[in-house]
Amino acid sequence: MNNEITGAEIVLKSLAEQGVEVVFGYPGGAVLPIYDTLFKQNSIKHVLVRQEGGAIHAAEGYARSTGKTGVVLVTSGPGATNVVTGLTDAMMDSVPIVCITGQVPQHLIGSDAFQECDTTGITRPCTKHNYLVKDVNKLSSVFHEAFTIAQNGRPGPVLIDIPKDVQFASGTYEEKNKIIIPSHRLFEPSPDFEKNKIEEAVELISKAKKPIFYIGGGCINSGPKASTLVREFINMVGSPVTMTLMGLGVVGSSDKNSLGMLGMHGMYEANMAMHECDVMINIGARFDDRVTGRLDAFSPNSKKIHIDIDESNINKTINVDVPIIGDVKQVVEKMITVWKEKKFQIDDKALKLWWDKINKWKQVDCLNYNNEGKQIKPQYAVQRLYELTKNTKTFITTEVGQHQMWAAQFYKFEEPNRWLTSGGLGTMGYGFPAAIGAQVGHPDALVVDIAGDASILMNIQEMSTAVQYRLPVKIFILNNEYMGMVRQWQELLHGGRYSESYTDSLPDFVKLAESYKAVGLRAKTTDELDDVITQMIETKNTVIADIWVTKEENCFPMIQSGSAHNEMMLSKDQKQDKKSAEKGKILV
Amino acid sequence: MNKSVYASPDQVSETKRHILTVLVDNEPGVLARVIGMFSGRGYNIDSLNVAEVSNDENISRITIVTHGTSEVVSQIEKQLLRIVPVHSVTNLDQEGNSVEAEVALVYIYISETNKKKVYQLCDLYRARKIENENNTTIFEIAGASERVNRFIKEINEITKVEIVRSGPVAISSIKKNEEE
């Protein structure tokens, strides 16, 4: 048999057959054979990051902005342990990733060899599935299964650990279509596709007097068609809709039915509507604690419909009346068909009363902030960024903290896949590498990382990556010299004792950018802001825009931990009652 | 009860013992995946038993005894099904009709004074003496966990013992369409 090739060649051939265009990685001893093979080919591009943690967030940004699977290649030991945060992040936010790690040769496994670690053991709880490939002849089938599992059902990260001797060994390659994956290893919706439940759900919606759609990241994972169908269905019903942090963009911000984001820092009207609705239609969201607030007071009088591809999300925290297991696109398509077939019509009078009520809540103007003086308010900075970029194809990524919430509140998303943020795990340092990944996937688009001064320093080394590959990523730092969200919680819950939340000795971000041969800009007052943003957009290079904002601004509205949707705090003066404040303090 | 940090107070159902049968691909790491899910999500394992049951298909059968409210156990079942090599999960208590058994080996410290009582008790429980080269007194008892518990309690009252138990295995007793 002369059609044998090396394990390393099988890796590259599998990636090529899977349509992989780019790999984010960092070389090392245990992956040298793969890097050698990579050197000899031209079809797959490699982006060299500066720390493995950057590689996996970049792959996440690439995956979430393009809808494709992100691929990561790192070495054994520290290479593998450095991607653990990113794997967990991808697991929480359901991002399809295939991560290839090198491993010491098989005869050294278990001997505490140099750069050895139990990669599959460490990553078992933070991947959808993982493999240690011991037989070179199984390598291609493992790769094809891994890609399928990463994308199938609820997407997630899959890791393939390959000992160095397997990369050198010779074996045969099997093509994708020759691999049969047993059905129990994949998610497959039942053939009759929950037909009865769908009819029951649609009928329930048609009888609603105060309906609300509660949209999550599952709608985005289901593909752009899903968003179109969800919008179409909501329009047919005429119901208000609110989105989770992960679901922003499914329904456009300017859509007449949109109430914006809900949850801890969500809109007052969205949370009040969730609290008072009579039928809640959850599509692809998972009743996260950041959304529900206190469970025993969560939407007490509603019938709940829950559409989710992952059955374990059903009744996990909130008991629902009509669960539907399936892919959003397929389920909503069926719902639309049923709605049309049965000529359902919602009670217009009741719906009008419902909207009247919601419009009253809107008048509270919950995002209102005091914008006096020359100092730049962080909210204002995001508003100006939106106004000056809204006519460009723009992707926004964020780090984690106050700036993330202000971005979610003040930047208006009209389309899915344009907003990339670490929702489930809340990983500081996510945004910049994710922006690099998004820019690799969309070379001509504008990609802006809205960052905080503390978060950006967690992966600042990726400046080298951005500059090396001429990626014109924009880092828009809302600089308040604090870990703002930590400071806010310390102010509200810990008597203003700002323990370790002031970031002393920050670098000069302009000089920092220049030292990487990127462009550094700074705005200190409102007069300078628009110019800096415009200059940032027009610069065809990597840019850090250091925006000096007021230092002690708090992010409102806020449902404090331990409170319910109808107990929102709109400003600092409105204190939570003492009992629930004490109870809430122990929560995260 | 649910697992959210914002725990809801209105717990309804009572905590009960459940026996779960999990069919899995017999591949490396599969047991670690199952056990890791339990420890990672804070569920209980009272006992666990695993063995290959078919040579041709490479399938193993894991029997797990756990306790929890029906909400928790249903969540355990769903979380188990998310594990890629898991074929199926059956809650034998929900099926209603199942038989269970376990095996215990008991090393009994025997003397002239307790010998008679020990043998009488073993006789009563139909525990079988296992012959061995060292001629020590080792009994084997099989049956429902309840029965094994009682035997162990009573033998403990007579003399010092050392015990190993397999933990229960169980199978559904519902009539299936038997072929051939």
Image (tube, rainbow, N blue to C red):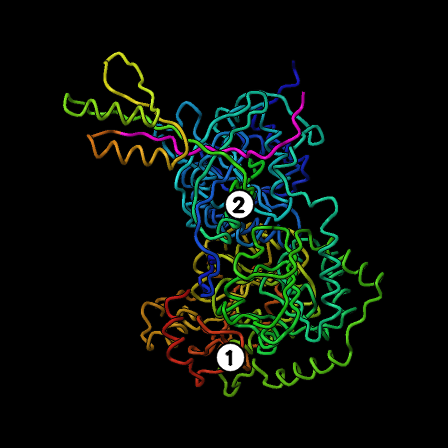
Rounded to the nearest angstrom, the CA distance separating label 2 from label 1 is 49 Å
Q: Quadrant of residue A256?
A: bottom right
Please, is residue A588 above or below residue B98 in the view? Answer: below
Q: Residue at x 77, y 72 (%)?
A: A346
Badge 2: how crowded within 10 Å, few (<14), some, or many (20+)?
some
Q: Is residue B95 above or below residue A264?
A: above
Residue ID for mark 1: A377
Drawn side of residue A438 relative to residue A117, left or right: right
Magenta stretch?
A: B163-180
**Could you say which is closer to the camera, residue A203 or residue A333?**
A203
What residue type is disc 2 on?
A: Glu
Q: Chain of mark 1?
A: A
Is residue A95 highlighted in magenta?
no
Q: Image quadrant of residue B35?
A: top left
SS state under label 1? loop
Check if residue B174 falls in the magenta segment: yes
Instruction: State the predominant SS element of the stretch in magenta.
Output: loop
- Furthest residue to the bottom? A372
Q: Where in the figure is residue A404, as x and y percent of width and height? A: 52, 67
Residue A73 in the image, given as x and y percentages of width and height? 53, 39
Return the residue nearer the eye: A32 or A429: A429
- Going by the image, does A249 lie left or right of A346? left
**Residue at label 2?**
B77
